């Protein structure tokens, strides 16, 4: 079943906020992801291994958070848009079961051959208000 489109990007202008998505992946979500990805790094599932490295508990892999951001961008770009770029900086760990929010805003819109390039600033914000991931993205929306 296709994911619904989040917003009509054709109406967005520079500075416009993007709709938020709230997520709270638990240990089973992370286990399925790392199993499929073939990761064998204990800090993603084992509380003791994570604490031994100075973490509060098992963490969510950066690749998993990137997958959330890509899914979010795919929803924004529906039905015919394309993701041209996603760059992310991972600033602090996110832990299993903790709620975080994907948010963002439009930073620039350019008419280009074949459509409109929409530049976005994205982030993952923890319940505490701290942003654990900051990203920039560009999507192309055809005319």
Image (cartoon, helix red, strand yellow):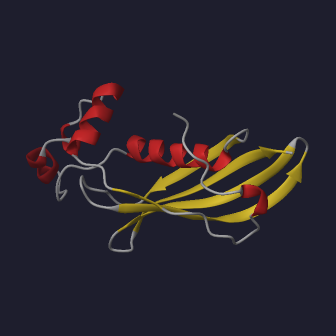
Q: Is residue 74 left or right of residue 81?
A: left
Residue 39 versus residue 67 in the image, above or below: above
Number of marks drawn: 0
Residue 1 versus residue 97 in the image, above or below: above
Give the residue furthest to the left. Answer: 48
- Give x and y (percent) for residue 104: 57, 64
Res. 23 in view:
yes
Give the residue furthest to the front. Answer: 1
Look at 59% across and 54% down and name the residue there. Answer: 6
Look at 26% across and 50% down and name the residue there. Answer: 59
Look at 11% across and 50% down and name the residue there. Answer: 52
- Give x and y (percent) for residue 67: 46, 41
- Give x and y (percent) for residue 42: 18, 38
Residue 138 versus residue 134 in the image, above or below: above
- Give x and y (percent) for residue 129: 38, 74
Based on the displayed image, in which of its 4 quarters is residue 108 positioned? bottom right
Look at 88% across and 53% down and name the residue there. Answer: 111
Quarter of the image with the C terminus in it: top right
Give the residue furthest to the right. Answer: 113
Res. 38 in view:
no
Q: Is residue 26 left or right of residue 36?
A: left
Based on the displayed image, in which of its 4 quarters is residue 79 positioned? top right
Viewer-closest of 19 and 125:
19
Viewer-closest of 54 and 76:
76
């Amino acid at each position: 079943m296709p994911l619904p489109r989040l917003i009509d990007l054709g109406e967005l202008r520079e500075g416009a906020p993007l709709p938020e998505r709230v997520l709270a992946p638990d240990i089973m979500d992370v286990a399925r992801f790392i199993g499929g990805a073939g990761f064998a790094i204990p800090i993603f599932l084992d509380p003791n291994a994570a604490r031994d490295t100075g973490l509060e508990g098992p963490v969510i892999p950066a690749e998993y958070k990137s997958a959330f951001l890509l899914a979010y961008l795919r929803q924004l770009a529906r039905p015919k848009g394309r993701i041209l770029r996603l760059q992310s900086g991972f600033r602090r760990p996110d832990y299993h079961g903790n709620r975080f929010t994907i948010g963002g805003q439009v930073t620039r819109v350019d008419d280009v051959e074949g459509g409109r390039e929409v530049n976005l600033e994205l982030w993952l914000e923890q319940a505490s208000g701290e942003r654990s991931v900051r990203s920039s993205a560009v999507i192309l929306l055809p005319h």
